[in-house]
Image: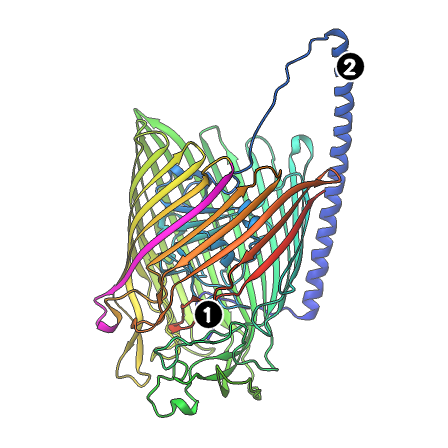
Amino acid sequence: MKQVSGGTRAVFTPRVMTRALGFGLGVSLMAAHALAMAAEGSSAASADAASAASSTSSSTSADNSQVLPTVTVNGTNGNAWRARTASVAGYENALLRDTPASVTVVTRAQLDDQQAKRLSDVVRNDASVNNDYAPVGYYEGFSIRGFALDPASAYRLDGLTLSGEQNVALENKERVEILKGLAGIDSGVIAPGGVVNYVSKRPENVASVTAGVDSRGSTSAAVDLGRRFGPDDQFGLRVNAAKENMHSYIDGTNGRRTFGSIAADWNINPQASLQLNAEFQQWIQRSASGYQLLGGAVVPSAVSSSKLLGAQSWAKPVTTDALNINGRFDYAFNDNWRAYVSAGRSRTMIDDNVAFVYGCYYAASCSSGSTSPYFFGANGDYDVYDYRSPGEYRRNDEMRAAVDGKFSTGPLRHEVLFGTSALHRVVHLSDAVYDYVGSENIYGPDVDFSPSPNSPSVSYPQLDAWQYALFATDRVSLGEHWQVLAGGRAVFLRQKSWTSQDGPESGTDKSALLPQIALVYKPVAPLSIYASYSKDLSLGDQAPVRASNAYSFLPPVESHQYEIGAKYDWGNRLSLTAAVFSISKPFEYAQPDSSDAGYTFVQRGTERHDGIELGASGRVSERVTVTASVAAIRARAYDSGNSAYEGHQVINVPALHAALNADWSVPGIAGFDLLGGLEYSSSRNANEEGTARVPGWIVVNAGARYTTRIAGHRAVVRLWVDNLFNRYYWRDAGEQQGDAYLFLGAPRTARLSVTYDF
């Protein structure tokens, strides 16, 4: 089954798509014209300036024959993987060293060098992040510190909430910020894992084109055009566009995507500025179902990573149309006080068509009752369903207004932030077709079945939720060595939901005060030590289809986090971090009982994750740059009332996960760098009882980058090979609506790209 909580899907008819593409083409042409005019004006101005400079130089030479000494400048561009600031922990562009939270920033340079296409390519740089139900051809799910991220609230674009039911394009992103752990003061109602924030590129004078190909036959092309123009470069415009034909490693799941974005800046005067962003992406690709445990207890062996389970001739690709727009107005009252107002809309529309593989209820091998019907049969049998859910629509509208400033009271220096926000979440879904059509076996040949004759209903509202918030924080500096950060967020949640078109309405009204407090000690300037406490509120999970309360939403729950950490900047070139944390929340699971369904989805007991994280980012020598991350997590359930779920690691959370990436500038070959990466995961439990485990694995990646000049313009050739040694491994053993699925990692794939600046 596909995730319902917090999701939308939408369908564009050919007529609507034609108009949309026509409008997008028109905007792109107008933008290109404006850029060309700006470039022409800039070139003319440069020519005039050069002429004037030449004249002045000649006059000066005639009057003064003094020769200045030669100055030689040496430098390396080896620190592009290291970020110094982020905007996900309450303050704008705050120094990471002084932020009392665990934050990872993946820079534009690292995205380019690793040729990242999806968020799963990005998060492999952070050991605290794992895939959590991330099938090919569908939007991906993730967990941070072992807690699954809620697509309704955990993903951000320029600080504003995204509809997470999309694979966000990366071509127009400057960096990706990952806040690990509770973020109550900054994020409101959210799952305790953390936040992923995409930061858009801003307009600047740039013009480049990138073409790429991979070893499976995928091709891509992207263009990045930007220009600042007007008096004092008052205006800025940037256009990004991309087209990709995707050839997947799973048979029958090829796809394509089209992307376009526009970013505009207007520096109205020295005090005021305006930013606008808009991006649209269409992603069309057939979705691949995951494997399940054989008989509910055994991980499948010797299965093909290229096999599409339940392949049917009548199955259609999943179509996802995503539109994200936002704007922001900033005003500086003086050097110490400023305010901003931002607003955004994120909308996803999904037409979901898939021959979905699930359980073995109808298979002969399960009819005896010795095997749970919610897993594959012990011999590999599984059921195939015709699943059609058109017109899924999810929308997030958010507005924020805030003021921040600096002032002193005696010896105390204050940095304050206060404001308000409102978030409106809407979900429309249909009564989907979900009909059994036949049974197959994971080791057998494909069998074609007839699709269901039934049709889905029209799309109708299933969720309407409002979140209002007031927030404030004060960072107080006591001398040069101590800081206290104290604040909170008052949230007001009002939610209505429907389980059927004519079904009863259920609602939730809840308010909570979410405090955050941190103490920071800086014994010396490069070192920061902190201790923090945070409280958060998150929406309850949705019951799985096998439960007696199927599809119902459990009430919101509170989470608590304690964290102690240290950050050190070594030689101003290498950032070292360490953090110890403990996060707890109510345990949510399918409790076996005497109901007709045999299970009821409940909140009972406590789920607690205790862990330690270590990280490094920057230059270890003049020629070597690294990013490294290690996370050790002990995730347990307590007082659940079911001993089978306790005393072992929670499902899909590795006890140890590590990631290392390096860039070595080869001596003697100007512009040539060798790249490498390694990711390690210990084994993971694949069911709630902890009786089945997927083995641990090590995956090695490698690549190279060569930077040169062609016809006077910069050109960069990049090669990246994922899974260099073609390791066979299970990358994901996550849950979806209470059911466990297994996904194999991709086999060896090489990507080659060329970027040319003109």
Depth order, front residue of 127/749: 749
User: Which color scheme is applied?
Assistant: rainbow
> What predominant SS class does the magenta segment belong to?
strand
What percent of the width, then of the height, locates residue 9?
Answer: 54, 68
Name which residue type carries label 1: Phe
> Residue visible at 46% across and 55% down?
124
Vertical comparison of 572 with 741: above or below = above
Tell me which residue sits at (40%, 72%) in the image. Answer: 737
Q: Earlier in the sequence, mark 2 or mark 1?
A: 2
Q: Residues within 10 Å of mark 2 (few under 14, many from 20)?
A: few
Residue at 69% across, 34% down: 230
Q: Is residue 604 left or right of residue 181?
A: left
* Image location (x, y in percent) of residue 758: 72, 42
What distance separates the C-alpha of mark 2 from that of mark 1?
70 Å
Residue topped by disc 1: 743
Q: Is residue 531 above or below residue 347?
A: above
Given residues 266 and 293, the one toward you in this image is: 293
Q: Residues within 10 Å of mark 1 (few under 14, many from 20)?
A: many
For the magenta stretch, what is the residue range? 623-644
User: Disc 2 designates what residue?
Assistant: 58
